[in-house]
Every structure is written in C-alpha cells, then in structure tokens.
Image (tube, helix red, strand yellow):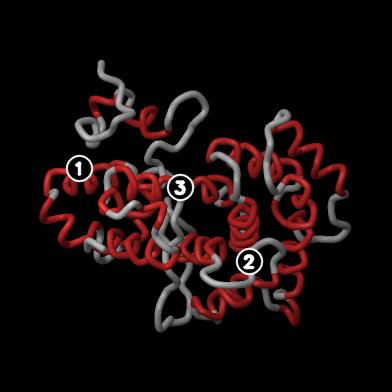
Amino acid sequence: MISAKRFAQSEAALFKATQDFVQSFADVTDPIIFISGKAKTVQARIAWTILGSTLFQGISYTDMMKLLGALYNAFPEEKLWTLPVPKEDQLMAVAHQVLQGKSWTLMEHLPGIFWSVGSFVRHHQKEGSDLTQWASSRNAEEIWRDLGEVYFMGKGKPRPKAAATIYRLVSPFPLGLGLTLESSPKMPPIPLSMGVRRYLSILGPGKYEKFSELTPDEKYRMAQDVFRELSSKTPNVAAHGLQFFLESGTKEFICRDHFKTCKACPFYEYCKYAIQK
C-alpha cells in the first residue's frame, strides 16, 4: 500500500492542491457544531453535539443540519434531557416535516436515540455534576467508552460516531467546542466521512490500490496516514476539509457551492466531476 509520504512526493502538484482544498474549508463550521454551538450553556452544547453525532448516519449534510436545527428549535437547550421527555409522535413530526418523505435509515430510531441521549445526560449529572465536569474529568478513551451508553452510538471498534463526537468536543471552533479533556495516551482514529472515502479512492493514494477492496483497517490506516501528511499537528483539520469533497448539498456539490465555480477549486484539473466552464 502506497504511503502518504510517497504519494505526496510522486504527485506533488495534486498533494499541494489537496492542502489548498483542505485549507479553504478550515473556517467552515462543522455541521453538528453549527447547531449545537447555538446552545446557551456548555452542558447543552455537549448534549446536542452527542445527539447530532449519533444521528449523523445515512443522511446528507444539509438535511442533517436542517433536522438537528428543527429538533433544537422544537426542544431547545435542556429539553433534550429534562423530564417529561418529548413524545414519539412529536419527535417524528419534526423529522417528517424536515425530510418530506426522504428515506433515512435512522428515522424509526430517532425517538430512541433522542431519549437515550437525554438519559445519558441525566446519568452523568448526578450528585451535582454535569456534562462539563464529565468531559473535563475523563480522557478520550474513557469518553469513548462512556458514549457506548448511547443508543446507536455503536458498541464495537472503531465506533466512528463516538470518535467523531470526541473530536467535536475537543477541536477548537469552528470544528468543535474546544473543550479540554484529561490527558489522553492517544486519540481514537479520525472517522472516515464519505468525502474522505471519495477523495482517497478518486484522487488520493487509494486510486492505486482499488480502495473499495481494501479491508476496513487498511482504509483507516491509509486515511490517518494522509491526514497526518496533510496536517501533522492538526490531522482533524484535514479530515474536516476533505469531508466536503463531492458531498451533495442542497442543489450542487458542497465544494462547488463553496468555490462558486469549479475553476476556482484547487482540484479543477484533477476532478472528473468539474464543470468545464
């Protein structure tokens, strides 16, 4: 499997274009943080970040932002975890209004996930504590383990939604909430968004390896290698930028909307989806 360093050397111009693409999205707010960051208290921001990270599966970025935003508007702040909890039909009504008949793999699980996150918050605010203290008193591995309490967060490894939650908690805005955890021996692998997978297989080192045929572990190793090569000190910034590669937006790819015209995109000469005008 070709290393990221070798790829960067052999395809220097493309690698530089990748760095430029990543940098252009460095100030774009993460879609979950865009909503959870509106909460007034740190505890609410953490809780809504956990909810959004858990729900973010099988749904587009734009629809995820609309759905999480609608849920937040309907049940703001502490209504996510205070009793009585919203009823199933209330939660489903919000989702149906936003998605307008679109298929979503987690639709029927939305109430259970919402209630589970609320239960998680109540569990970790016993004895005068709250989620802020919960986060600050644990390292990444302990938070990763605790998040297994949340319905549909995942139980086994690599548990990408739990890892995504952790990175959203610790990364500075606009990628995350900028919280400080206990010192961690190591952070979990950065999850592979669909944008990252597309980049690796279409433009990145995965194009030499038949990326789709690699094992999950091989895909993870390749991605982490590329993230570190792109941004050694902040690999999560590289992952953040690449998640927007050929990601569907409201009408166009998010990257096309971002650059206004494909000619302005660093990948213009390399992307087969670029509009030639």
Dividing the picture into quadrants, the one containing residue 117 is: bottom right
- Residue at x-position 59% and y-position 50%: 56
Residue 26 visible in image: no
Q: Give neighbour class at mark 1: few <14, some 14-19, many 20+ (Cα, 10 Å).
A: some
- Residue at x-position 31% and y-position 62%: 234
Dividing the picture into quadrants, the one containing residue 247 is: top left
Mark 2 or 3, nearer chain start: 2
Whole-percent x and y of residue 59? 60, 42
As helix, strand or loop, the secondary structure at mark 1 comes to helix
Q: CA distance from mark 1 to mark 2?
A: 35 Å
Q: Nearer the viewer, residue 114 or 198?
A: 198
Q: Which residue is mark 2?
A: 154
As helix, strand or loop, the secondary structure at mark 2 comes to loop
Q: Which residue is mark 3?
A: 194
Q: Residue furthest top?
A: 277
What amino acid type is highlighted by mark number 1? Ala
What amino acid type is highlighted by mark number 2? Gly
Left or right for 24, reference 160: left
Dividing the picture into quadrants, the one containing residue 275 is: top left
Q: Which mark is residue 17?
A: 1
Q: Nearer the viewer, mark 1 or mark 3?
A: 3
